[in-house]
Amino acid sequence: MKKYVPFLTAIFSALCFLSVMYFTEQILKPDYFLKSLIKFFTIAVILIFSFLFLKKTSQHSEKLTDFLYFRKMKPAKHLFLCMIVVFIGCLIIFFCVRNQLDFSAIRKNLMTKEQLTRKNCLFVFTYIAIINSFLEEIFFRGFLCHLFDENHRKMGILFSAFSFSLYHLGIMNTWLNPILLFFCIIGLVLVGVFLQMICDYYQSIKASWLVHGCANLAINTIGIILIYFY
């Protein structure tokens, strides 16, 4: 039974996070600042509790930074190129599917529900590119996936990626039509797997954080276009 403790911890942690964020997103519907605080404290509580619990039950003896895979990164060969490709790729995907998007619904969501304006959007988008991407990488790639041992590595990658996809589904479900939403779910799972591969290859979430930040930067560029030009 003891060997299943990390696995059960991963499931419980994902369910707690997804439930809190779904309730926040769909029921409370706070502005972006409050939602960000809820997300930060939810992740912090889950990570600290899990770290102490697993250490107490002798499931690991690592430092917190190692436990969360926030380690020294391997030489970042080709990583910069990967960041550029991801940034350009996100923009290309947007322009390919732009006719299927409900721009009015997205813009309304950004400016009413999230309470973004031309005055505060640059600050919020900077936060999303740097801090928000870090929180998601530390939780999904650094924490969730690495609770699975080497014998269940593929399961851990898929579980983390699927949780990552479900979390974003709660944010975007009113933006897309059902067909596009389905492909978005599959796409986000693939993105989660890709980021995990980056994280594992460079042996640190610092690498996947940089790539994730570039993807968010591209999405923020689209957000700026919607706020300023639509």
Image (tube, helix red, strand yellow):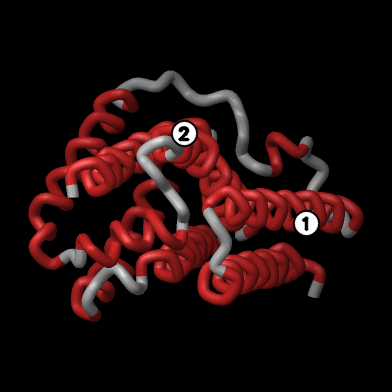
Relative placement, left or right, of 133 versus 44 is left
Q: Amino acid at mark 2?
A: Phe
Residue receiving disc 2 = 123
Seen in the picture, residue 185 relative to 112 is either above or below; the reply is below
Residue receiving disc 1 = 50
Q: Are marks 1 and 2 in contact (CB under 8 Å)?
A: no
Q: In the rendered view of the protein, which quadrant contains the N terminus?
A: bottom right
Q: Nearer the viewer, residue 104 or 207?
A: 104
Q: Residue at 33%, 73% (x, y): give it.
A: 174
Q: Position of residue 228 (x, y in %)?
A: 24, 41
Badge number at residue 32: none
10 Å neighbourhood of mark 2: few (<14), some, or many (≥20)? few
Q: Amino acid at mark 1?
A: Ser
Say which of marks 1 and 2 sits in front.
2
Question: In the orientation shown, which residue stands out farthest toward the bottom?
Answer: 178
Q: Residue at 53%, 37% (x, y): give it.
A: 205
Q: Position of residue 181 (x, y in %)?
A: 27, 73
